[in-house]
Structures are given as C-alpha cells and as structure tokens.
Image (tube, rainbow, N blue to C red):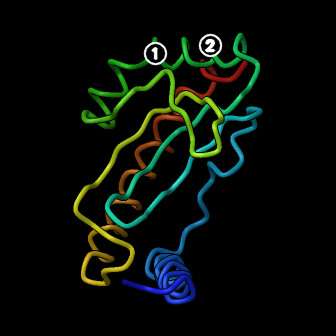
C-alpha cells in the first residue's frame, strides 16, 4: 500500500518517463471541437486511451456521437478493432459523456514493471486515434 504522497510521486514519475521515452506533440489535445477530446488514463488496474464527448448539451453530444457511429465499422476495421463504443458513461463526478476507448488490463501505475508495456500501449493507440481523426476530421467536425 502506498501513501498519497508516494502514489502522487509514482504517477508523476510515470508521466514524466512517458514524455521522455516517447517525446511527441500530440496534436489531438486541441481538436477544435467544443467538449471533444482525446485522453490518456492509467490507474491501479487499467490503462486507457479514449475519445470523449463531454458536451452537456445532449442534442449536440448526440449529433457528434451519431457521426462517430456512422464511422464505427471503418474505425474498427482500419484502426482499432477492439474499441469499445459507449454512448453513455458516467464519470466519478457524475458527468455524463459518450466515449470510444481501448483498454489494457492487468497493469498498474504503482508497478514499474508494467510501465513500459503501458507506455507502448498508450503511444500506439493514441497514434491510431489521431490517424482516424485526421482522416475523417471533415466528417466529424460540425
């Protein structure tokens, strides 16, 4: 078991190490679409790369979600066959979003032995999300 401070240092250490190991400017931090973002996540049991639609205007969120669903077969065939499409996800803060994600299980940010595998997973999958977005940006953007 780790203290909060030890856990915080491990988390910081991972993300610093990731940035140094795979230096790259991720172009999708700013998609140009309001409340539409790409995210990395790594916790005590799972790593995840996701494309999140956080727009609280349900009509706008559904409009964007429908565009992504129309591209689902292409996304699965050409980019990420194991991607999970979830039209409704509730975050810890109660916020409702829509999400496309890929996950890696049996890894932990507290276990440095899983860091390299996780870094490669994050790098490769974010690149696939970026490639998809760049290819179909004109269709996705409002």
User: Of marks 1 and 2, which one's residue comes earlier in the chain?
Assistant: 2
Q: Is residue 8 left or right of residue 132?
A: right
**Quarter-wise, where is residue 139 in the image?**
top right
Residue located 36% across and 56% down the image: 124
Residue located 36% across and 83% down the image: 1
Classify the position of the C terminus by image quarter. Answer: top right
Residue located 53% across and 26% down the image: 136
Give x and y (percent) for residue 30: 72, 47
**Label placed on residue 69:** 1
Secondary element under disc 1, as helix, strand or loop, is helix
Disc number lying in front (1 or 2): 2
**How many residues crowd mark 2 within 10 Å: few (<14), some (14–19), many (20+)?**
some
Q: Which residue is mark 2?
A: 62
**Label placed on residue 7:** none
Give x and y (percent) for residue 38: 57, 46
Q: Is residue 35 left or right of residue 17?
A: right
């Amino acid at each position: 078991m780790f203290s909060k401070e030890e856990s915080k240092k491990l988390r910081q250490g991972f993300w610093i190490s990731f940035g140094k190991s795979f230096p790259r400017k991720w172009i999708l931090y700013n998609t140009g679409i309001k409340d539409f973002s790409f995210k990395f996540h790594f916790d005590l049991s799972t790593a995840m790369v996701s494309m999140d639609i956080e727009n609280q205007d349900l009509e706008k969120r559904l409009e964007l979600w429908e565009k992504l669903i129309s591209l689902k077969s292409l996304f699965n065939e050409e980019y990420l066959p194991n991607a999970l499409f979830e039209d409704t996800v509730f975050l810890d803060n109660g916020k409702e979003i829509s999400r496309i994600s890929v996950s890696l299980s049996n890894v932990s940010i507290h276990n440095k032995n899983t860091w390299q595998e996780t870094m490669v997973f994050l790098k490769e999958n974010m690149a696939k999300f970026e490639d998809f977005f760049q290819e179909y940006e004109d269709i996705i953007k409002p």
